[in-house]
Image (tube, rainbow, N blue to C red):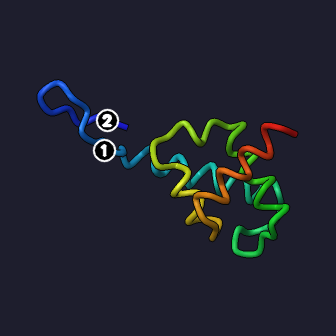
Amino acid sequence: DIPLVWEGEVVGGLRRPDLHDALEVLIAAAETELGVPRAEMGRTQKQAAVTLLNEWGAFTLRKSVEDVAEALGVSRFTIYNYLERSETA
């Protein structure tokens, strides 16, 4: 992500298109790894996908939680719960 700076303060950011594509590639790789399309994933498979994405560094990208939540058809809160659960396991 590229920070937008105004008078010395970061006021926003822009996501480079290639980084957004990188997140989509990681989500597709998680689908392949788990052997099930995201539209057919159950809760356990979505948790496993989030764990994989976290291991692969997907959540270092700005707004990635929102994008992954949308891709998996869950809320941001659910993604944060999955992340917390995977880190305590």
Circles 2 and 1 in contact, beta carbons < 8 Å: yes
Label 1: element kind: strand
Determine whether, in the image, residue 83 is placed left or right of residue 36.
Answer: left
Q: Quadrant of residue 32?
A: bottom right
Q: Quadrant of residue 44?
A: bottom right
Mark 1 highlights which residue?
Answer: 14
Establish if 9 lies above or below 27. Answer: above
Residue 35 horizontal/vertical position (percent): 83, 62
Q: Foreground residue, 36 or 82?
A: 82
Q: CA distance from mark 2 to mark 1?
A: 5 Å
Q: Residues within 10 Å of mark 2 (few under 14, many from 20)?
A: few
Q: Foreground residue, 76 or 35?
A: 76
Residue 2 numbered tag: 2
Label 2: element kind: strand
Quadrant placement of the N terminus: top left
Residue 70 horizontal/vertical position (percent): 55, 66
Quadrant placement of the C terminus: top right
Q: Residue furthest bottom?
A: 40
Q: Residues within 10 Å of mark 1 (few under 14, many from 20)?
A: few
Establish if 37 lies above or below 14. Answer: below
